[in-house]
Amino acid sequence: MKDTATTFDYDLNELDRSAWLDQVDTIAEDFGYFEPVGPNHSAVLIDAGHTLLVTFETAPNVRKHNDGHAPLGWGFVQSHGWSSLTLLADARTDWFRHPAVFGYFDRLIDDGFFDDFDQILFYGSGAAGYAAAAYSVAAPDAQVLAIQPQATLDPALARWDQRHPETRRLDFKTRFGYAPMMVETAETVSIVHDPSVIEDAMHASLFRGENTTHFACPYLGPNADRALNAMDVLPEIIELAMDSELDQGSFATLWRARQSYGPYLRTLMHRLDADDRHERLLMRLCRNVDAINKRPAFKKKLAELEARGVSD
């Protein structure tokens, strides 16, 4: 292990895709390695402390949404001194089902790579959340944090999820296939999802192990990871999951950040406004938001409700 927390630095801003990937390669080679994994994936290791964050991400999403346009784990290298292993896909959405990825994890297992770490967390969201859960079997007793993961997209088991027609050619029946089975060897499995997104709720329900805890974030939408990051709570969720300390109480405390998160409040307002039975709840919401945050849309809706004689 290397003490890189004080020396690890990077600048990935204002780079086109090719230059960005070249710079990621250069930085990783200085502090670990950058390794192509088949035609469409890469493995990026930053070798630092005895705590390892394994993330599954896609290059387009990292470049567009991540802080500093860097793999998620790199921030934890700087702030916590953790090691970071990023499985990086070229496509915007990817389930990491290429045989080369199977082979890469086989090699990590054979080399005893994961034995060098005291704590390990596998993390991903959506399709990458599926991958994080599925490949966690490579490191028994690891922690798993998956946000809105698919359990499988095998048509025999999940034909009801029609959101991803591009997966029809993928094989979810072979190795590292059924994510709820693959997480059975994990120490803790944390599944975060929005129950109002029906398909996500159905996938989450397939993760039923005794080591699994479900965390609901209703009305956060299909990109809960981005929303939690915008609320400045995702890093702490990851830290708690790494330490096996993410539970309903700690999550509920962090979830309170939604009370000042504009997109969540607007979604909740529209949901309540769509049902006349919730007029009084809508009135309370608009009054509270207007009192604290002075948001024009809520002030306008509050005036409309008051004009109609609604009271809370």
Image (tube, rainbow, N blue to C red):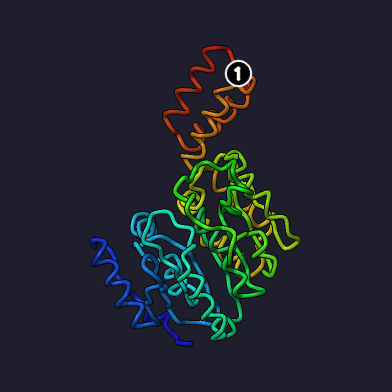
Residue at position x 44%, y 62% from top? 57
Question: x and y percent of residue 6 in the render?
Answer: 40, 81
Labels in figure, total: 1
Specify few, some or many for label 1: CA neighbours under 10 Å numbering under 14, 14-19, or 20 or more: few
Q: Is residue 277 above or below residue 152?
A: above
Q: Is residue 291 above or below residue 121?
A: above
Q: Which residue is mark 1?
A: 276
Residue at position x 63%, y 44% from top? 201
Residue at position x 68%, y 49% from top? 205
Question: x and y percent of residue 21 in the render?
Answer: 29, 68
Q: Is residue 94 above or below residue 24?
A: above
Circle 1 SS class = helix
The amino acid type, in three-letter code, at marker 1 is Asp
Residue at position x 43%, y 54% from top? 93
Specify the quadrant of the image occupied by residue 69. Answer: bottom left
Q: Which of the pair 28/14 is nearer the observer? A: 28
Specify the quadrant of the image occupied by residue 70. Answer: bottom left
Q: Is residue 63 left or right of residue 299?
A: left
